Image (tube, rainbow, N blue to C red):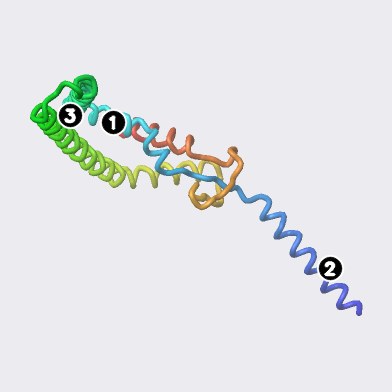
Amino acid sequence: MKTMKTLVAGLCLIAASQMANAQDTKIGVLNALQALFNSDAARVVQEELEQEFGADEARAQELSTQLQELSAKFQQDEAVMTDEEKRRMNSNAQDLQVQLQLIQERVQKSLQEKNQQFLQSMQGALATAVSDVVAEGGYDLILNVDSAPYFAPVLDITAKVTAKLNENNAAAN
């Protein structure tokens, strides 16, 4: 009987020490995409994209304005327009819509490609930044934000990783 009490007491001590160790575990939660896209490197890429697609954006805006004006004119003059004028105006509207859609598709495809290139080029830098933050902060576990249905905001290390990305990037340049 005394041996059983000793065994139970020993098991309780082991469980208590493991719980104490688990309480000392430092956990962080990271939104890697947010960390990357909030970085200075992402801002540079964004500025490049704005310059590259500025003309397309201006043309898309111009086409949208023309479509709105054409629609307003059609609604205003529809009662006095001939069937031929209605067909011509509808054809013009369709042409403008096709041009606008082509521009939007081209820009969207290019943006997706540029974002993918950016993500691939920054994978190593992100891994280094996360490793640096883990080492500096003494973290035992880093969770992806998508795998944590709830977490206290104090556990979020995304801003720290972004700052480390910026710091490492500045040091490299």
Question: Where does residue 47 sit, x and y in percent of width and height?
Answer: 26, 27
Q: Is residue 144 visible?
A: yes
The mark lying in front, picked from 1 and 3, is 3
Question: Where does residue 122 sit, x and y in percent of width and height?
Answer: 32, 43
Task: Tell which circle, 1 or 3, labels the residue nearer the N-terminal end.
Answer: 1
- The front one of 7 and 153 is 153
Q: Residue furthest bottom?
A: 1
Q: CA distance from mark 1 to mark 3?
A: 15 Å
- The front one of 73 and 113 is 73
- The front one of 157 and 128 is 157
The residue at 20%/26% (across/down) is 67
Amino acid residing under circle 3:
Asp
What residue is shown with label 3?
56
What residue is shown with label 1?
46
Q: Residue furthest right?
A: 1
Amino acid residing under circle 2:
Ala
Q: Which mark is residue 61?
A: none
> In the drawing, does residue 173 fall left or right of residue 84?
right
Q: CA distance from mark 1 to mark 2?
A: 62 Å
Question: Where does residue 93 sit, x and y in percent of width and height?
Answer: 16, 31
**Local secondary structure at mark 1:** helix
- The front one of 123 and 168 is 123
Crowd around label 3: few <14 · some 14–19 · many ≥20 (10 Å): some
Crowd around label 2: few <14 · some 14–19 · many ≥20 (10 Å): few
